Image: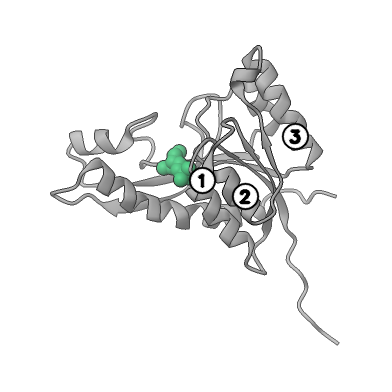
Amino acid sequence: MGGVTPVHKISLAVLISGRGSNLQSIIDACRIDNFPAEIKIVISNIEDAYGLVRAQNFNIPIRVVSHKGCSSKAEFEQRILSILDEFKIDLVCLAGFMRILSPTLIAPWEGRIINIHPSLLPKHKGLHTHERALEDGDTESGCTIHYVTSGVDEGDIILQKSVAILPDDTPDALAARVLEQEHIAYPEAIRLIASTLPKST
Ligand code: GRF
């Protein structure tokens, strides 16, 4: 007798707008046997986001919800909410999703929606984080995985990874160094919080 009890896998939706390298790190993690999550759907607001190709390469279902094709932000978010319901999602992962969400979407998912941000929050909320870290003469930067709330980049921090800022750093060089840590951080954060979520039926 015996055998290994299969790990309970929570169902993820990953929301993207672009190249999807963080999505790829989650796809790769989900291919590991004992990783406690699987991606059920990738949603993009941009039709030709490269991340959609990454999902299709692994036979992960995709949906495009173009904000431009919706008459209001509420309609855009309602359409995403319907997809999250349809795929019985447990945890929503924003991974380079470039739309600011309102309470229409965030409120029903509070505590079950997370984001990655390329700075050591609370420093450098918003865009152009690497430029600002260099301009401010910071000696370190990094990335943050945090819960999403209606305050942009303000929810509770799940985990952070830091990198040193080097004397001759450029925004691109720093971004690349931070991105390597992002790809480690996102799967680690999912693993961390998977055990805290109620199991879906
Ligand atoms: C990442 O730097 C992420 O932190 C930020 O947007 C970028 C998305 O990159 N929110 P990718 O699409 O995952 O490659």
Is the residue at mark 3 in contact range of ligand 1, meaning its CB lies under 8 Å from it? no
Q: What residue sits right under mark 1 in the picture?
A: 20
Disc 3 vs disc 2: which is toward the camera? 2
Q: Position of residue 125 (x, y in %)?
A: 38, 31
Give the residue type at disc 1.
Gly
Q: SS at mark 3?
A: helix
Q: Is residue 138 above or below residue 77?
A: below
Side of 192 where 198 appears, left or right:
right
Q: What residue sits right under mark 2 in the picture?
A: 55
Quarter of the N terminus within the rendering: bottom right
Which residue is depicted at the point 62% across and 25% down?
Answer: 66
Q: Is residue 186 above or below residue 104?
A: below
Measured in 3D between alpha carbons, the distance from the residue under mark 2 to the one under mark 1, in whole angstroms, is 9 Å
Q: SS at mark 1?
A: loop
Mark yes or no: residue 16 visible.
yes
Specify the label residue 83 is tagged with: 3
Q: Earlier in the sequence, mark 2 or mark 1?
A: 1
Disc 3 vs disc 1: which is toward the camera? 1
Is the residue at mark 1 in contact range of ligand 1, meaning its CB lies under 8 Å from it? yes
Q: Is residue 97 above or below residue 4?
A: above
Badge 3 crowding class, 10 Å Cα cut-off, few under 14, some 14 to 19, many 20 or more, is: some
Measured in 3D between alpha carbons, the distance from the residue under mark 3 to the one under mark 2, in whole angstroms, is 16 Å
Q: What's the colour scheme?
A: one colour
Side of 172 where 197 appears, left or right:
right
Ligand 1 image-quadrant field: top left
Q: SS at mark 2?
A: helix
Give the residue type at disc 2.
Ala
